[in-house]
Image: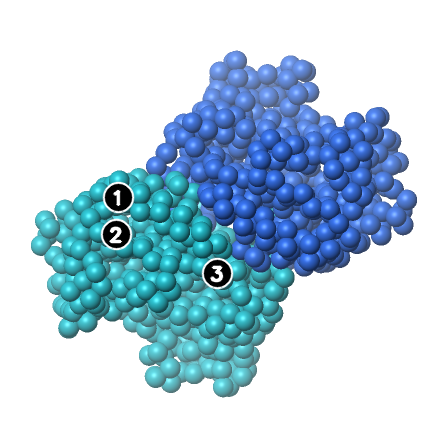
Chain colours: A cyan, B blue
Amino acid sequence: MPETFTPFTDAHADALRAIVGAEQVSTRQADLDLHNRDQSRHPMGNAQAVVWPLTAQHVADVLRYCNTHHIPVTPWGVGTSLEANPLARFGGVSLAFERMNRILEVHADDFQVTVEPGIGHKDLNAQLARYGLFFPPDPGANATVGGMLANNAAGIRTVKYGASKDNVLKMQVALADGRLISVGSRSIKQSSGYDLLHLFVGSEGTLGVITQATLKLVPVPSLMSAVIASFPSVQAAIEAVVAVRGSGLDPAALEFIDAKQSALLRDHTGVDLEESPTLLMEFHAVLPAALEYGLEQVRQICTELGATRLKTTTDNAERAKLWSVRHHAYETLVRLHPGYTFLIDDVAVPISQYPALIGYVEQVVEQHGVRAYMKGHAGDGNIHCEFPYKDAEELKRAEYINDLIVTKAIELGGTATGEHGVGTGKAHHMPHEHGEALEVMRALKATLDPHGILNPGKIFPR
Amino acid sequence: MPETFTPFTDAHADALRAIVGAEQVSTRQADLDLHNRDQSRHPMGNAQAVVWPLTAQHVADVLRYCNTHHIPVTPWGVGTSLEANPLARFGGVSLAFERMNRILEVHADDFQVTVEPGIGHKDLNAQLARYGLFFPPDPGANATVGGMLANNAAGIRTVKYGASKDNVLKMQVALADGRLISVGSRSIKQSSGYDLLHLFVGSEGTLGVITQATLKLVPVPSLMSAVIASFPSVQAAIEAVVAVRGSGLDPAALEFIDAKQSALLRDHTGVDLEESPTLLMEFHAVLPAALEYGLEQVRQICTELGATRLKTTTDNAERAKLWSVRHHAYETLVRLHPGYTFLIDDVAVPISQYPALIGYVEQVVEQHGVRAYMKGHAGDGNIHCEFPYKDAEELKRAEYINDLIVTKAIELGGTATGEHGVGTGKAHHMPHEHGEALEVMRALKATLDPHGILNPGKIFPR
């Protein structure tokens, strides 16, 4: 892949101004600083200009220009990523989507909405509330829809509703050479030609840039319940996960918090938890009796597996309080570690391998004498390990352990990243995870982006 | 795409025998005849040898040999396709999967199974029954899993469980040059690299050949109900579809049968139907009260929309009887048209466009004075039009009308094929449906199959 580019000059900035308008290009340091950061531990980016397209045609024209002149283009949503996915590594343009953030059309009868990529999913859902519909993927932060699709973001509702890739039907994509293509269909079913939609989803802006997306929506659930259960062992907790999923109860969230973090949250949030592996669950229903029945089933499953504490509720306020523990778990961690930054890992394995993975993390963390907390989307086999560090040496050690965990996850039949994407942080694990398939990915990249201008330095190891 | 190939000779057959064993290659006419047919109206294929691989390595080695010698290879499952998808058009090898039909591993705790591509989905589900799990996509015929994945087959349960593409996690794929790669992951979540899994799914054997697949399974539902409702108009029926989907009742099937076919089924099956647009529905639940509640909701929706006849049941025998009408609808049609063959169309549109599509079909059919019946997966916006014909002239007229309907479906924001795939029958509609994206598909094809040996003549128009 070519990684030599034309040095970016004022003449390039002026040419871009001629394409998108003077107001839509900045080389001011403050703008560059903002767009050269995400929420990760990784070094800042080095974009030399920020370009805010207003239309899909702007995106296409900017790409065509940069492709002709061999200038790197790195798409940027709102900077909530954790693996440097939207940070320029070879200079050039940060293509920022703050000004393409409109809902273009609500197709209420089709349970679909067509949006520009710069809209935040929380802002989108606030506007969709009046239709009784919502876009389910929720990575926590108010990530943009474009960023979520480009990185296949997921979150706590994925066990029921799927990841971003499962909730998009159609996209408009700008190619490196400036062509605008349409991929997928507003028809729910399509067996027509190659699935280019899912090729661009999760490609982190390295194959093309999403300029429009039609999303699947689902009805807002009318009734919800919540469960918190503590277990004597990780194995017992995971047996409960398997039993709940096998029962046909279709949980809407199935989250795991390790013993250490549970105790810490108990001590600092006042929520009734134990120093034990803990599961948080949520169920949706249309009938109160069904909700009660489901909870009774869950109580039985958890009790049979030796749950030492079990709390269930169908009350909305109480449910919100239980879940606030999960939603604020990371903030709580940060608050309790003043002066520390966190390395957040993200690996996923087949559920049957979850106990083995967690056992390995506990072992390796103890062996190396580092602090680490675990929580994760157990229903999906996805776990996040959080390593606090305060200096370069601690970071290096955390990264070393992080690499061990990723390697183990891949060996257990899992993946280097369940929902954060590859960016630069996981690129060196790609040969291990994908083997020869990585060469196929490289071949597709070379076909669609022969000059390598699209988000260079990401996904593929150097 | 190159479409000139090396003439297939006895020497090639002998070389293939050396790769897979003498018993696994045949040039006998009876074997060729069997593998040069599917269930479609399209001309027979012209494969010159049938090769039955026993292992993934056999597949890879056959492909490497044929790639080196520029011999076409057309994968064949069991020949249930309707668009000539598995029929050789340029001679060469029919790569037949009858002898790679094993379950390799049941991952019961993960709700997954790993299979060879030649297993029929009905045979698979029979063997999975003991685990209380099943693979939901059901195209009707006992298609092979490999064929279903290659064509992204769907069926009546797709409204709840998704199409084939939504129910596969990982595949092993043999490339044209003989490399074997692994795509996807047994981890439910994966945000790692390009989604090659979905690039190969639905590519109809034109990019690579599936040699192994790990499928998602779901728990067998414990309780089911069925509903049949007749409506005064197609519009009212589709309003019911939208209302049922919007209610959060999550139907497991939501089928439409047009007035003409409903009357015909009433007269010849004894099931209580009217000559009106008819919906058949199925719901799954874990609690009897939830099933009853759901039916009450559906009754209200249908009654408010003017349903003229409404029958609901939670009794398994009665449900089976109701659904037998749908399952045997095509056979009933065939039986009532002795001497006729059927052209079966397959288009899909956004649900909001379903009345417009059906109105158009009714109009164009009347205008041209042909017979046609409609049924479809209304919950997905998918419709099948069935045109009986008895000679070449009637077939030609049916094909003409078929083309009009496909064109209309695409204009309504839909697709040329919801679940049957492109094969040769829909290839000429690809430029209209995909525009410039078709050129991207061609570029990917050229990258992965530079000599064009993989199922040549399919998907892309000549």
Residue on which disc 1 sits: A303
How dense is the environment of label 3, judged by Cα within 10 Å: few (below 14), some, or many (20 and up)? few
Where residue B376 sits, quadrant-wise, is top right
Horizontally, is A364 left or right of A183 in the view?
Answer: left
**Residue shown at the point (52%, 43%) measured from the top left:** B284
Judge if badges 1 and 2 mark residues of a common chain.
Answer: yes
Q: Are marks 1 and 2 in contact (CB under 8 Å)?
A: yes
The earlier-in-sequence mark between 1 and 2 is: 1
Q: Position of residue A31 (x, y in %)?
A: 38, 82
Q: Position of residue A104 (x, y in %)?
A: 59, 71
Q: Position of residue B88 (x, y in %)?
A: 65, 30
Residue on which disc 3 sits: A222
Report the chain holding disc 1: A
Judge if badges 1 and 3 mark residues of a common chain.
Answer: yes
The earlier-in-sequence mark between 3 and 2 is: 3
Amino acid type at circle 1 is Thr
Residue on which disc 2 sits: A310
What is the CA distance from the residue labelled 1 to the residue labelled 2? 8 Å
How dense is the environment of label 1, judged by Cα within 10 Å: few (below 14), some, or many (20 and up)? some
